[in-house]
Amino acid sequence: MILVYTDGAAKGDPGTSGAGIFIKAGDNHFTYSIPLGILSNHEAEFHAVLQALKICRKEFPAAILSFRSDSKLVVDTIEKDYTKNTIYRSLLEQIKEEAKHFPHFFIKWIPEKQNANADKLARKALYLE
């Protein structure tokens, strides 16, 4: 099983944004800081999950994925498979499409303090553009 920690950050809301992804695969760790352009903080959180799925599709095809996020909005939206927000709905559909490539995709909410690695990577991404 691959553990994937994701976080999004934005300077301003909306503003310059980035995604942080920290992946644990056995004894190996992989880190990604991805600039996302101008987005709201919530949009950046969704994009972080989407980018992480794309990375996993390339690096860990057919793996069982267990995602962790400190965004209750993102976790609840994915778990309930529903949102009224049209922007989030589009992102949810993209996430669902990417997740189809894996036998199992789980997502769990964690407190912010347990997501420090991904948070640091997301903040780093704000300065990479």
Image (cartoon, rainbow, N blue to C red):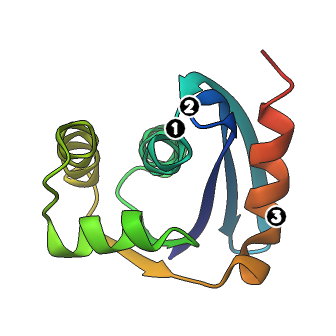
Alpha-carbon span between mark 2 and mark 3: 23 Å
Secondary structure at numbered mark 3? helix
Residue at image position (40%, 74%) is 107
Left or right: residue 121 compared with residue 96: right
Q: Residues within 10 Å of mark 3 (few under 14, many from 20)?
A: some
Q: Residues within 10 Å of mark 2 (few under 14, many from 20)?
A: some
Q: Position of residue 90 (x, y in %)?
A: 20, 37
Q: Which comes sooner in the sequence, label 2 or label 3?
A: 2
Q: Residues within 10 Å of mark 1 (few under 14, many from 20)?
A: some
Callout 2 amino acid: Pro
Q: Are marks 2 and 3 in contact (CB under 8 Å)?
A: no
Is residue 17 shown above or below 101?
A: above
> In the image shown, does 27 or 126 lie closer to the viewer?
126
Residue at image position (39%, 67%) is 73
Which picture quadrant has residue 80?
bottom left
Q: Position of residue 119 (x, y in %)?
A: 77, 58
Is residue 95 shown above or below 10?
A: below
Callout 3 amino acid: Asn
